[in-house]
Amino acid sequence: MPRRTRYALGAPCWADCITPDLSGSRDFYSALFGWEFVTESPDYQLALLGGEIIGGFGAAPAGMPPGAVWNTYLATKDADDSCTQVGRHGGRVVMPPVPVGANGRLFLAVDPSGVAIGFWEGHRAEGVVLADEPGAICGHELRVPLAATAEAFYGALFGYRLTGDGEFELDGVGQARVVESDQGRPQWLPHLGAHDPADTVHRAVELGARLIRPGREEPPVLRDPWGAEFGVVAAPAGGGGGA
C-alpha cells in the first residue's frame, strides 16, 4: 500500500472535489471506487480508501457557478512567498493564504492559461497519504491551449520542465501530463487508478457519468453527474484494493 507523507516543492500533493451535491457525489465515488468519508468540518469531508486519506470533498459555497470541479493543489513550504510569486509571474490570486485548522494553510489562484490551481502548505502530513494504487490518485493532467505558457509559469514558480513527450517534470521526476488542447475548459485534473480502466469507465457511465475523451492516445476522461472531470488510468502493478 503506497503511502506518502512528504512531497517535493511544487509537486501535486492534494486534490478535492467541490460539488453542489455533496451527498450525491459521495455516493457516486463510493460506488465507483469504494471510498469512505469522514467529516472534517460541516462543509468538508475527507475521502478514505482502506482507512487512508486519498483526497477531499467540499460543498460548493453559495454563489459559486453551477457544477462540480476537481481541484489540484501544489506543495509549498511558504504560502505567502508562493502567493507573491504567482502574481509576479502572470497568475492571479483569487483567495489569499488562509489557515485550515491546525493542518496548514492554502490559497487559490488562476494561472496565465486560466487554469484554477491551489497551493498547500502542510504543517504535518503534506497531502494525500495513499496514492498510486487502484481507487487512489495515480497522477495528474494539465490541459492548456499552449504548453509553453504553462511551462513558463510553473517553471518560474517551481522549476517545472516540459519533456518532449509531454511530461511535466520536477528535478527529473514526472509529476503530470501536459495535454495541449483548445477543446474544453483549461484545467488540472486528477487521474484515478483502476485495475481495469475500461471496466471502471463502463461502470462510471452506468452510474451517470459521461465519457468525454475516449482514451485512444491519452487516458480516458469522464465527467461525473455534477460536471467534475477526472481521468482513469491503470494503477501501477502491485497496488491492491479499489476499483
Image (cartoon, rainbow, N blue to C red):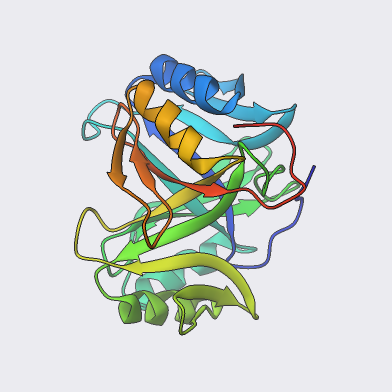
Residue 155 appears in the rendering? yes
Q: Is residue 221 above or below residue 102?
A: below
Looking at the rendering, in which quadrant would you find the N terminus?
top right
- Apparent side of residue 224 relative to residue 235 in the rendered image (left or right): left
Counting from the top left corner in percent of width and height, residue 242 is at 65, 31
Q: Which residue is at a point 61% across and 64% down the rendered structure image? A: 78
Q: Which residue is at a point 39% across and 16% down the rendered structure image? A: 24
- Apparent side of residue 166 relative to residue 87 in the rendered image (left or right): right
Residue 142 occupies quadrant: bottom left
Q: In this view, does 12 lie above or below 159?
A: above
Counting from the top left corner in percent of width and height, residue 129 is at 71, 43
Looking at the rendering, in which quadrant would you find the C terminus?
top right
Residue 97 appears in the rendering? no
Q: Nearer the viewer, residue 9 or 211?
A: 211
Q: Which of 105 and 234 is in front in this view?
A: 234
Q: Is residue 151 above or below residue 212?
A: below
Counting from the top left corner in percent of width and height, residue 187 is at 33, 55
Residue 51 occupies quadrant: top right
Q: Which residue is at a point 41% across and 20% down the rendered structure image? A: 22
Counting from the top left corner in percent of width and height, residue 230 is at 41, 44
